[in-house]
Amino acid sequence: METVVASKPMIKVAAICGSLRKASNNRGLIRTALELTKESINGIEMEYVDISPLPMLNTDLLVDGKLPPAVEVFRQKILQSDSILFASPEYNYSLTGPLKNALDWGSISPNVWADKAAAIVSAGGGFGGARSHYHLRQVGVFLDLHFINKPEFYLKAFEPPAKFDRDGNLIDEASKEKMKQVLVALQAFTLRLQPKN
């Protein structure tokens, strides 16, 4: 008799980094998440969505009801995803300008963020970017994003042992394991929010 093993349904995750710097530790968190979904977590298809091509929000750029091409491409990638992974550096106790800009472009009607599960990770000094989480969650309430509550991931990047190499790649194994826990929680929450067939 043949054994049938049920696999988890595949979810699509859009990974967005609030830092535009290539060697950013937060971008390194996204690279780690991408590696983990390919190597050790079944059921997650993740794509890095670059926000650097987005122009600064200016509704004068809407011409005849059409958004700029870079914005349309961005919005389509968010629409096609089931959930979002944000890597949100903390700038002056808040999220970054480029990330807020991306959130604003996505919120133009129809809001592409609505009813999606989301998770936030960050790395930085002091509080490890934790304050950016609070502000991003607050913005997400208005956008109808649904964030996982646990585990929280804010990494104090400059405390020993070394967490990142000089290119911003995560090298700390304990932090990689914590990232895996975040991704598994995001996957479970995403599946919970999806309508039952």
Image (cartoon, grey):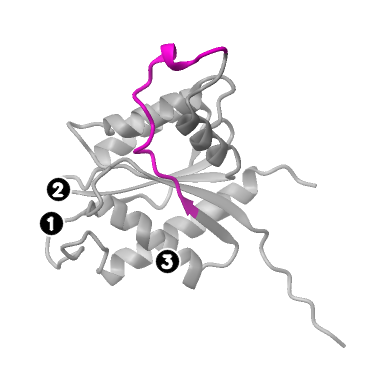
Name the spot of residue 133 as percent of width and height, x first: 32, 38
Amino acid beneath label 1: Phe
Amino acid beneath label 3: Glu
- Tell me which segment is drawn in magenta: 47-64
Of the two numbered discs 3 and 1 in the rendering, the one whose residue sits closer to the viewer? 3
Name the spot of residue 121 as percent of width and height, x first: 34, 49
Query: Residue 125: which disc?
Result: 2
Name the spot of residue 158 as percent of width and height, x first: 12, 56
Of the two numbered discs 3 and 2 in the rendering, the one whose residue sits closer to the viewer? 3
**Dot 3 corresponds to which residue?**
35
Q: Residue at 25%, 51% (x, y): give it.
A: 22
Earlier residue among tags 1 and 2 = 2
Residue 50 is inside the magenta segment: yes
Q: Residue at 26%, 63% (x, y): give it.
A: 169
Asked whether residue 40 is in view, the answer is no
Q: What distance separates the C-alpha of mark 1 from that of mark 2?
A: 6 Å
Check the picture and name the quadrant holding the N terminus: bottom right
SS class, disc 3: helix
